Image (spheres, grey):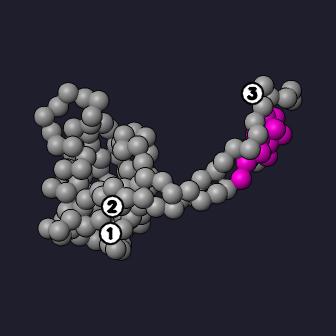
Amino acid sequence: MLQSLLAERFQLRLHREDKDLRVYLLTVAHTGAKLKAVPGPEDSFTFRPGHISVKAQSMDELANKLSRPIFGLGAPVINSTGLTGVFDFTLDWAPDNLQSDGPSIFSALREQLGLKLEAAKSRIEVLAIDRAERIPTEN
């Protein structure tokens, strides 16, 4: 519904294409993952700057959340851990925009969860805008 509204009001035209982009691969650190799978459909994700608390989340869900701008990584995160199931954990780090002595998100993932982020290039599907009007048509 939103796509058709944007297409109608802004004359938005777009297409999908694959591009080689900088990404981070979420992998298991050489020390091994410090996570234990848990049963339970009750999932939750609580975020505040420098802290997340997670219940029953998969590694795919964690990678998706780490891709968001609030984490400041500047690139999509792809799950390459090979870990299946869902996990409960907390993660504490010092965000770049706050004055704090805590670890970076990279160090915190490695030290607290036994995971690491590796810079890589990967083919990612993106939306390319072909046309868009600045002023929408009237209702």
Dominant SS type (magenta) = helix
Residue where numbered disc 1 is placed:
81
Could you say which quadrant of the image residue 84 lies in?
bottom left
Residue 118 or 70: which is nearer the viewer?
A: 118
User: CA gap, disc 2 to disc 1?
Assistant: 6 Å
- Does 132 appear above or below 24? above
95 within the magenta span: no
- Does 48 appear above or below 97? below
Give neighbour class at mark 3: few <14, some 14-19, many 20+ (Cα, 10 Å): few
Residue at left 33%, top 55%?
Answer: 119
Q: Amino acid at mark 3?
A: Arg
- Does 101 appear above or below 35? above
Magenta range is 3-15
Q: Which numbered disc covers residue 26? A: 2
CB atoms of marks 2 and 1 within 8 Å? yes
Residue 91 or 66: which is nearer the viewer?
A: 66
Residue at left 46%, top 61%?
Answer: 122
Can residue 38 be seen here? The reply is no
Residue at left 30%, top 58%?
Answer: 118
Whichever of labels 2 and 1 marks the residue nearer the N terminus, that label is 2
14 within the magenta span: yes
Local SS, label 3: loop
What x and y, as percent, mark residue 52? 30, 47
- Does 29 appear above or below 95? below
